[in-house]
Amino acid sequence: MTSWHIGTMGFSYKEWQGAFYPAGMASRDFLAHYSQFFNAVEIDSTFYGTPRAQYVERWAAAAPADFTFCPKTPRAITHDSQLTDAAPAMLEFLDTMALLGHKLGPLLLQFPPDFTYIHAGPLADFLGKLPAGRRYAIEFRHRSWDRPETADLLRRYNIAWVAADHIYMPKEIQRTADFLYLRFLGQRGQFGRKDQEQVDKTTELQQWQQRIEPHLEHVTGVYAFFNDDYAGHAPASANRFREIVGLEKREIRPPQQGRLF
C-alpha cells in the first residue's frame, strides 16, 4: 500500500500565527504543533547551509515517531559549486541529517535554471558517489533535461525525478524511483498575505491526482510539499490536497478568540 507524505516547504513562519499556529505561540513550539496536522515537512532552511547537530536533534525530538523530514540540500552544493568537488560537502550534510534517524526521508537536490544538460557528466559522477541506503529526489529547472537519458540516469540510482507545478518544466510525472516526489510552487512574492489561500487550486490539484493515480501500484510512497506562493497559504493547500487524494481533511485554523464587546 502506498503511503502519503503531504506537508509544506518549511514550518517556521511567523506569518502563519493566527491562521495555522495559535496567536502568540512561541516558535520553538511550531514543529510540535505542525506535526499534529501533517506527517511530513520539507526542510527549507538547510538550503542555506548544513545546520548544527543540536538543531537537527531538536527537530527529531519534537516530531512523533511516524513523522518524515525531507531536507533540502545546501545551495553551496547544488548552486554555487555546480557539483565541482561537491562530494565531501554532501557527505558532511548527510552525516548531519542522519541524526534524524528513521524520520529522515528523501533528500532533495534542487538545481538552478543555469544547471543544464551540459552538466550531465558531473551529475552522473556525483550520483555515483552518494552513499547507498538513502533516498534522493532531484528537481531540474532547465528544459534541456527533459529527455529519456535523464530518466535512465536517475533510474540507475533509484532517484526520484521531482514533478513540479512551476514555470520551468512540463507538468508531468516521470517515474524513476520506487517513490514519487512532487513540489507545488508559485511565483515568489505574488501574494501580499500568507494567512489564507488567495486562489482556488482545486482543479489543478485534481489534475495532479489524476497524473499520480497510474503510478500508485508501482511506488511505496508519495511525497508532496507546498509553499505559500502556490495559492497564498501552504498549510491550507496541503490540507486541500489531502482531501483530493482521499485522505482526511482536517480543521487547521486555530480557534479564534471571541470579542468581549
Image (cartoon, grey):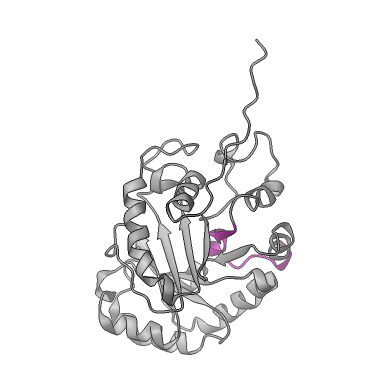
| The furthest residue to the top | 261
Instruction: Name the residue rendered at 26%, 64% in the picture.
Output: 170
Q: Where is residue 81 in the image (x, y as percent from the top left)?
A: 44, 75
Check the image and report above or below for 227 versus 103.
Answer: above
Q: In which quarter of the image is the C terminus?
A: top right
**Going by the image, does 30 lie left or right of 220?**
right
Instruction: Name the residue rendered at 65%, 25% in the picture.
Output: 257
In this view, the residue in front, 207 or 101, is: 207
The part of the image, by quadrant, that contains residue 124 is bottom left
The part of the image, by quadrant, that contains residue 151 is bottom left
Residue stretch in magenta: 39-54
**Going by the image, does 11 lie left or right of 187?**
right
Q: Can residue 90 be seen in this view?
A: yes
In this view, the residue in front, 117 or 258, is: 258
Q: Can residue 165 be seen in this view?
A: no
Task: Look at the image and say whether residue 42 sits in the magenta stretch.
Answer: yes
The part of the image, by quadrant, that contains residue 98 is bottom right
Q: Position of residue 122 (x, y in %)?
A: 39, 85
Q: Where is residue 162 in the image (x, y as percent from the top left)?
A: 40, 69
**Going by the image, does 113 lie left or right of 216?**
left
Q: Position of residue 206 (x, y in %)?
A: 35, 53
Instruction: Name the residue rendered at 45%, 47% in the picture.
Output: 240
Give the total of numbered labels: 0
Task: Look at the image and say whether residue 202 sits in the magenta stretch.
Answer: no
Instruction: Name the residue rendered at 49%, 44% in the picture.
Output: 236
